[in-house]
Amino acid sequence: MTTTFAPPPSAGPAAPTDRFTPAESGPALTAHPVAAHKGIDPLPLICRRCGARFDPAPIAICEECLGPLDPLYDPDRPLPDRATIAARPASLWRYREWLPFAGTPTLSLDTGCTPLVDAPVLARALGVARAWIKNDSVSHPTLSFKDRVVTAAINAAAAFGLDTFGCASTGNLANAVAAHAARAGIPAWVFIPHDLEIGKVIGTMVYGAHVVRVRGTYDDVNRLCAQVADRFGWGIANVNLRSYYGEGSKTVAFEIAEQLGWRLPTAVIAPMAGGSLVTKLRKGFAEFQLAGLVEGTAPRLYGAQAAGCAPIARLVESRGEQLIPEVPSTIARSIAIGNPADGLTAAAALRETGGWAAAVSDEALVRGIRLLAESTGIFTETAGGATVAAALDLARAGHFRADDEVVLCITGNGLKTVEAVATALGESPVIAPRLRELEPLVLAEAATRGAEPRPTLAHQV
C-alpha cells in the first residue's frame, strides 16, 4: 500500500507567481543586502551554542562564538490542528507554521508530499512488523529530497533580495538549486567536484545554471563557496542561507507522521552526508509531539554511510566526541562528505534517541539498490542503496525488534547514478524477432525457478 496526500481544494485564492524579480541591486560586493519584501519574511536567528540573537539575514554562523544559527520561532504562534493541515494543498507548505518564515511563500509552492510505500519484503528481511519507504526519489521537480531544502532556501534568497542563487554540491543539491532558480528566474551558480556522475552534471546544466567543476573533494568545493558568498554577496543555499535551508528537511518527519495516521514509527533510517537530515528528522518529530499532533514516542534514529566515507558512523561506533575528517573513496558520491558540518549533532541525535549508525561497502550498497528495486519497484541512487544495506546490517546486529515499525528514507533517484549498477546487472540478451530464439531463454529462466513454463493455446492444439 502507498500512502499519498489528498488533492488540494479546488477553491481558494490564486497562487502567487512562481517568479522572482530581483530588487534594485546595491553595491556589487555587498554581502548582506537589505531585505526585499516579497510576501514572505525570514525569521530572526538564534545561536544554538551561546543563545545570541540576530535579525533575519543571510548568515549561518554566530559572530560571538562561531556556533550555528537556527531560526527563532515564536513559541506563542498559533498552530494548526490535524484537520486544518490535512485540508491544505499537498505540498510541504501545509506545515508552514514550522518553517522559518512569516507571511506567504511565493516560490516553489509544489514541492513535498512524496509517497510512503509499504515494503513487506523488506520488513521480512529486517525481521520487523512493518517497513515503509519514504520515497523522495520522486520528489518534485528534481527527484531528490534536496528539493525540500532548496524550497526553503530560495524563498529566503528572494526575501533578502539576493540576485544570485548557488550551492556547493555532491549532485542532488546542484540539480535542485539549478531547477528551482530556473523556474524563479534567478541566475544560478553551482559548484561541484570535478568527478561527479555525468547524470548529475547534465541534470544541472540543462536548467541553464552556471556550473563550475572544482578540482578536489566536496569539502574543497564547500570552502570555496564560503568565500564566494562573502566576496559576491550571493545566496549560497548551504552556506550563508543554511539556517533557513536546513529547516526544509523537517518536512520529511512531518509527512511520515501524517501519512502514518498521525502517529510515529518506532525507528527511522536515513543516509548521512553532512548529517543535517537526521538532526532535522529528530527536530521535526519533536515539534509535532510538542504541538500534540502525534501519538507515540520519538523514534530511534539510525544513520547510513558508505564505508569509503563514514566519519559520522565511525564517530558513533567509537562512542567518541571528536569527529575525524576523511578523504572520500566511494561510489556513493552524494553522501561523500569527509568533514560533515553537522556531524557531531548527527552523532548525538543517533545516540540520544537509542539508534546507531552503519557504514557499508560499495558492493553492499549496490545490492541494496537492487533489493529495493526488485522488492518495491523503487530505483534509488547510491545513497538509498547505502540506506537499505545499512538497515540489513543493523538488523543482523540486533538493533531492531520484532514489533518495530521502520521507515527507510530514500532520498534520490537511481536514474542519476546508473553507473553504480550497470556492471552488476550485466548485459541483456539480444535475439532475432523469432519465437524459437526466445524459447531457450524462457526455459532457462523456468529451470532456475524449478518451474515449467505455462503452455500456451498453440502448445495445446
Image (spheres, helix red, strand yellow):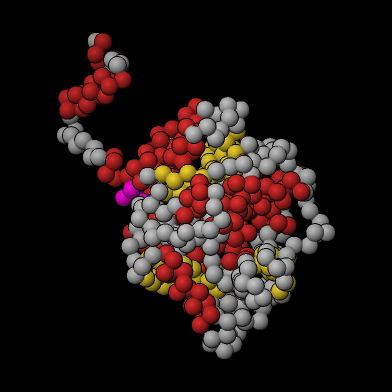
> Which residues fall within the magenta stretch?
416-420
Q: Is residue 34 magenta?
A: no
Q: Nearer the viewer, residue 454 or 97?
A: 97
Total tally of numbered discs in the picture? 0
Residue shown at 24% from the left, 37% from the top: 428
Residue lying at the far top of the rendered structure = 461
Magenta stretch prevailing secondary structure: helix
Q: Quadrant of residue 34?
A: bottom right
Instruction: Provide residue 169's location: percent of width, then percent of height.
Output: 45, 64
Q: Nearer the viewer, residue 124 or 360?
A: 360
Instruction: Provide residue 28's location: percent of width, then percent of height.
Output: 53, 87
Q: Nearer the viewer, residue 16 or 266?
A: 266
In the picture, measured across the screen, residue 20 lies left or right of residue 447, that is: right
Which part of the image, by quadrant, shows the C terminus? top left
Residue shown at 17% from the left, 28% from the top: 437
Instruction: Provide residue 127's location: percent of width, then percent of height.
Output: 52, 27
Residue shown at 36% from the left, 46% from the top: 362
Which part of the image, by quadrant, shows the N terminus? top right
In the picture, measured across the screen, residue 103 lies left or right of residue 190, that is: right
Residue 120 seen: no
The image shows residue 78, relative to residue 256, as above or below, that is below
Residue lying at the far bottom of the rendered structure = 27
The image shows residue 370, relative to residue 194, as above or below, that is above
Q: Nearer the viewer, residue 185 or 178?
A: 178
Residue 35 seen: yes
Instruction: Provide residue 371's location: percent of width, then percent of height.
Output: 40, 35
The image shows residue 360, relative to residue 187, as above or below, that is above
Q: Is residue 417 magenta?
A: yes
